[in-house]
Image: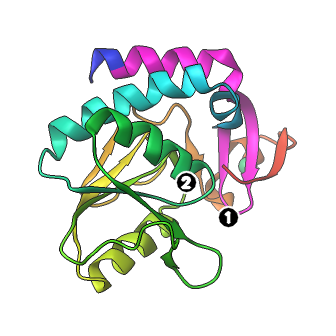
Amino acid sequence: MDRIAELNLANGLKQGALRLGHTEFLSGGHADGWVEKGALFSVPQLLEQVASAQAHHIGAAFPEATLLVGAPACGAVLASFVARHLQLPVAYMLTDGSLRWHRMHVPTAGQHAVDVDDLICTGEGAREIVQYLNQEGHHVLGISCWLSRVPLDSLITLEPPPFQTYTVGECPLCQAGQLLTYAGVWE
Ligand SMILES: [Zn+2]
């Protein structure tokens, strides 16, 4: 665990991003809490602290990176914040409908790309982005995010997930008869 990253993300989470309680995700799973990333994204000074730590991690894990990729809205903002520290170009990947590049930067093939994200819940979106990058002739070095609820190939995170995640059938909170505190969450 990188101490700088740990402190910066922990600080951000303490600013009100952590939501404790029986949670149901739109994607179907249950958990004992979730992270409201808006608490960090709405305060650029806080986002900057986390982005700085994330850049430090990416620079150490993937020093050969030539491109950072982020998906609008929050992922694109974050990718730009992080890229500023690494002095790397960014490209935005539109994920509404079929995946495609935002016209602001369509990178030439052969980039050494890192997918930059904040929170990974099911991993489905990240897997699709990696697949698209490969199809477009790029070499995907890995995925960087703050926290992930699932393991993924070549994934680096700032911290382990602060919550337990369950399938509905296995959720011990449901089994204990606890009502949902948060329903329909899109983390
Ligand atoms: Zn449950």
Against 19, residue 102 (above or below) is below
**Where residue 9 sits in the image (x, y, percent)?**
48, 23
Residue at the (52%, 80%) spot, across then down:
99
Provide residue 187's location: percent of width, then percent of height. 66, 49
What numbered label is drawn on residue 136? none
Q: If the image is split into quadrants, where does the N terminus sit?
A: top left
Q: Is residue 173 left or right of residue 121?
A: right
What range of the chain is rendered magenta?
5-33
Displayed quadrant of residue 33: top right
Ligand 1 under 8 Å from disc 2 Cβ: no
Q: What type is the residue that disc 1 sits on? A: Ser
Residue pointed to by mark 2: 121
Residue 148 in view here: no
Q: Amino acid at mark 2?
A: Cys
- Residue on which the image places disc 1: 27
Was residue 17 drawn as part of the magenta stretch in this picture? yes
Q: How is the image coloured?
A: rainbow
Check the image and report above or below for 28 versus 44: below
- Look at the numbered discs 1 and 2 and tell me whether their residues touch, using CB distance below 8 Å: yes
Which of the two labelled residues, at mark 1 and mark 2, occupies the earlier sequence position? 1
Relative to residue 143, is residue 170 drawn left or right? right
Up the image or down, 42 lies above or below 110; here it is: above
